[in-house]
Amino acid sequence: MKKLLSILFFTSLCILLPAQEKEDEFKGTFKIQKTGHLHKVVFDDVNYRLVGIDEYGNILDTAVVEFQMGVTIKGIYSQEFTAGYKLSPAMEKLLGRSDQSTKIFFDKIKAKDRYGTIIEMPKFTYTLGSVNKDYDN
């Protein structure tokens, strides 16, 4: 009888211990996401805005304060300036008239760093219809 009780006891332990581990597998420590200095500014072609990216890869939505956009359509170069991080309605009209291989020039970009000071960011170009190589599998 003692052997039977000890076998049942160890069998129940072997069944219950793995079940306990599965309940605890979602417990852990919180990781705090680091924020760093503003590293670069990129064009978000889905939401038509400029976003900043810090040195850890975090997206800073409202880092851009003002910028200028230029585009050449049918040999005519047009420029628009806006305050804020989103494209103005005039800029969106320019993009609506362009084709899939048009290059967009962003310059005079001013953004806030994590301390709130305004810094000048380097200019860059973006080609409509291009695949971002960072997200290409």
Image: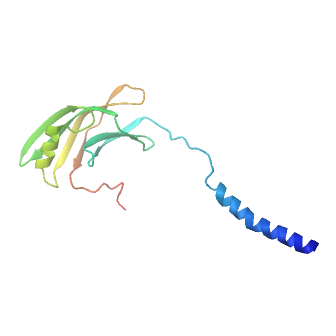
In this rendered view, identify the residue nearer to me: 7 or 27: 7
- Residue 64 lies in what quarter of the image? top left
In percent of the image, x 65 and y 60: which residue is there? Answer: 22
Asked if residue 55 lies left or right of residue 81, the reply is right
Which image quarter holds the N terminus? Answer: bottom right
Q: Residue furthest front?
A: 1
- Determine whether 20 is above or below 102 in the image: below
Q: Position of residue 46 (x, y in %)?
A: 27, 49
Q: Position of residue 105 (x, y in %)?
A: 20, 42
- Determine whether 9 is above or below 54 in the image: below
Q: How many marks?
A: 0
Which image quarter holds the C terminus? Answer: bottom left
Asked if residue 62 lies left or right of residue 105, the reply is right
In this rendered view, identify the residue nearer to me: 17 or 2: 2
In this rendered view, identify the residue nearer to me: 116 or 96: 96
Describe the colour scheme in one phrase.
rainbow
In percent of the image, x 6 and y 49: which residue is there? Answer: 74
- Residue 25 lies in what quarter of the image? bottom right
Asked if residue 123 lies left or right of residue 11, the reply is left
Q: Position of residue 57 (x, y in %)?
A: 42, 44
Q: Residue furthest top?
A: 117
In percent of the image, x 61 and y 46: which residue is there? Answer: 29
Q: Position of residue 91 (x, y in %)?
A: 16, 40
Q: Residue furthest left?
A: 75
